[in-house]
Amino acid sequence: MNLLITNIKELLQVREPNILKVSGSEMKELPTIKNAWLLIEGNKIADYGSMENIPEIAADETIDATGKIVLPTWCDSHTHIVYAGNRELEFADRINGLSYEEIANRGGGILNSAKTLQDTPEDEVYDQSAKRLEEVMKLGTGGVEIKSGYGLTEEAELKMLRVIRKLRENYDLPVKSTFLGAHAIPKNYKNDPDAYMDLVINEILPEVAKEDLAQYIDIFCEKGYFSLDDTHRLLSAAREYGLKPKIHVNQFNAIGGVKAGVEHDALSVDHLEVMNDEDIEVLKGSQTMPVALPSCSLFLSIPYTPARRILEAGLPLALATDFNPGSTPSGNMNLVVSLACIKMKMTPEEAINAATINGAYAMELSETHGSITKGKFANFIITKEIPSYTFLPYAFGTNSIESVYINGKIV
């Protein structure tokens, strides 16, 4: 089936197939075509151009997009969508003055979610997670990475990864899977954290690889969680199973996690709320994508990733939601793009690049997703009638999306 969209006010993120990411000053450039048309054949982008030069096309369906903008769907490269229950009581605790660390130290935080996940049947975890995935798709997300990490036992971690696999099988958008067994130290290992790392590396990791349940490995490299030595141990072990690193670093402290990630050829280093000069320097010349999670900063009232320092150093940057029950109970990439502009001082062009082509790169999807490119999958957003693409981050409380298409089909 052919779908033709005509009279598009502006077609955003039009790229040649060799552009897999953009960095530094390149991120200020957002290639567009005004008064455009777009042709979809089956599940792929077939052609596009200016209405002044539109050829005769026999389309099965034609959409008139007068006054509307078309852009690629958001690529959310860091989520924890698979979880059970919620943590709204801890939200109230934070309002009453407790810090994220204080809540975690008294058994809340990740350990709270792990207990709930362990006690929830797999089919129920799937049902809850599927609703979240459908929600973010309607908000414009057309590619997503999902982590485990709320299991913290072999049985529960594998349960989470099986749910992620089932989501990938049942939904059309690409779903990437990350094993995050090293998310927190369980209560029963509090006095012997090395024993828990032994369990993750020697028991759970081989099972994850045996069942082919993940493409990536992750670890929360942070004071009070997992050390640099733990990070090197786990990433070295995971390499033997072909799992690439995508790791949590520099959320509260800079302890060398960025350098460790680069040394292990990490696909991405995520959070980066705290960055020093060494972190910036070590990323230069690497293939590792820095990823910022501004809605986490909003929810926890912690610093925002210093986007201007990163971009002015000539580096790329991606944006993601960190959708999870404790620190970011939202998968709304539209809000993320707005926060990047409002709080991180990114331009609309930089933020849209970070949330599309660079987000795709951080999931190894930029050859097939993240831009309007001939031959790429037809994952795109049609906005409502809006004055310009700057209106998207500007009107941060408005849903400007009219429709979302995944593989050429409306969501």
Image: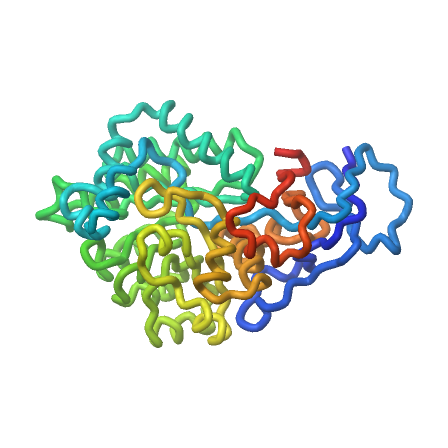
Q: Position of residue 363 (x, y in %)?
A: 49, 51
- Tell me, yes or no, if residue 142 can be seen here: no
Please state the horizontal and vertical placement of residue 386, each as a whole percent of the image: 67, 50
- Vertical arrangement, residue 334 with respect to residue 403, above or below: below
- Tell which of 144 and 386 is nearer to you: 386
In the picture, residue 124 is in which quadrant?
top left
Q: How is the image coloured?
A: rainbow
Q: Quadrant of the N terminus?
A: top right
**Residue 275 seen by the camera:** yes
Question: 297 left or right of 404?
Answer: left
Q: Would you say 273 lies left or right of 395 here? A: left
From the viewer's side, name the closer residue of 206 and 304: 304
Q: Nearer the viewer, residue 349 or 402?
A: 402
Query: Given the current orientation, which residue lies at the most extreme right position?
Result: 56
* Residue drawn where x is 77% and y is 46% of the image: 66
Residue at (29% x, 26% y) in the render:
120
Image coordinates of residue 152 in percent, x first then y, are: 24, 39
Q: Residue at x 49, y 50 (%)?
A: 335
Task: Tell me the quarter of the image containing the C terminus.
Answer: top right
- Nearest the viewer among 322 and 330 is 330
The spot of residue 244 in percent (x, y) is 41, 53
